[in-house]
Image (spheres, coloured by chain):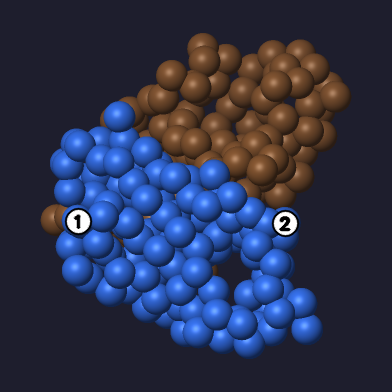
């Protein structure tokens, strides 16, 4: 079936450290890939997306590249801030195969210390 | 563009009671999705609408759950005879489907606690 696997958290970093959160997927078609972020007590905010292989999504210093050969969509940021502390979700959708519903990973909690 | 809104934000109820949640999508979005999120997990799909038509329901959506989108605008999700296992965050998202573009934008969620 279709699924998303993320690295387990929590991830604890010092401010200005480099961030990588791994995400791999299994899909029966050609998915679109997303990263969403969830701050405590809030809903999900779209962080970035990529709709085809080799596309790079970017936003607020975060980047992720759609790698079809490794079925991955790892999230990176060069220098994290305390305000980046949140839970990050990787997700996929298959418009033609599944009607567009999002399939999420389990989430990775990031804690950035000053 | 005011974003997706949900009401109420929090609901505490006793087991066996019925509850109803409302979602107002971004105006002109033709798709509306409901998800459920339990603590420490990613959201799980429940159901979705394209305009007023409910196109898919997850097996998670038991007979006690019903969702409507009567005029293709706002949607309601009702849970009858609530159980403690229904305690979760209920998230609504909307999107405008255009070709293969279907980016979903989420509301703040309704947190349900069943005592």
The x and y percentages for residue B115 are: 85, 24
Rendered image: mark on residue A41: 2
The x and y percentages for residue B103 are: 33, 59
Give the chain ID for the brown colour: B
Q: In which quarter of the image is the N terminus of chain B?
A: bottom left
For the residue carrying disc 2, how many other residues have a C-alpha within 10 Å: few (<14), some (14-19), or many (20+)? Answer: few
Same chain for labels 1 and 2? Say yes or no: yes
Residue that badge 1 annotates = A69
Q: Residue at x 56, y 86 (%)?
A: A79
Q: Residue at x 44, y 68 (%)?
A: A75
Q: Up-down: is B37 above or below A30?
A: above
The residue lying toward the viewer, choosing from B58 and B68, is B58
Whether residue A41 is visible to the viewer of this picture, yes or no, is yes
For the residue carrying disc 1, how many other residues have a C-alpha within 10 Å: few (<14), some (14-19), or many (20+)? Answer: few
Q: Which of marks 1 and 2 is nearer the N terminus?
A: 2
* Image-based side of B91 in relation to B19, left or right: left
Mark 1 or mark 2, whichever is nearer to me: 1
Q: Residue at x 56, y 37 (%)?
A: B36
The residue lying toward the viewer, choosing from B81 and A78, is A78
Give the chain ID for the blue colour: A
- The residues bearing labels 1 and 2 have C-alpha atoms spaced at a distance of 36 Å
The x and y percentages for residue A65 are: 30, 69
The residue lying toward the viewer, choosing from A40 and A9, is A9
């Amino acid at each position: 079936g279709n699924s998303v696997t993320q690295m387990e958290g929590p991830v604890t970093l010092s401010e200005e450290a480099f961030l990588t959160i791994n995400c791999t997927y299994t899909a029966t078609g050609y998915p679109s890939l997303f990263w969403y972020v969830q701050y405590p007590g809030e809903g999900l905010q779209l962080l970035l997306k990529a709709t085809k292989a080799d596309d790079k999504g970017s936003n607020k210093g975060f980047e992720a590249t759609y790698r079809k050969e490794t079925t991955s969509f790892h999230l990176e940021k060069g220098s994290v801030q305390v305000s980046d502390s949140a839970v990050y979700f990787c997700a996929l959708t298959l418009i033609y195969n599944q009607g567009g519903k999002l399939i999420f990973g389990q989430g990775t909690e990031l804690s950035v210390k000053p | 563009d005011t974003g997706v809104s949900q009401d109420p934000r929090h609901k505490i109820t006793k087991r066996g009671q019925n509850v109803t949640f409302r979602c107002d999508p971004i105006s002109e979005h033709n798709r509306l999705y409901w998800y459920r999120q339990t603590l420490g997990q990613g959201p799980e799909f429940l159901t979705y609408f394209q305009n007023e038509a409910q196109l898919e329901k997850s097996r998670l959506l038991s007979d006690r759950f019903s969702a409507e989108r009567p005029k293709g605008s706002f949607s309601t999700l009702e849970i009858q005879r609530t159980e403690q296992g229904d305690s979760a965050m209920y998230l609504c998202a909307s999107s405008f489907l255009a070709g293969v573009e279907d980016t979903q934008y989420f509301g703040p969620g309704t947190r349900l606690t069943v005592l």
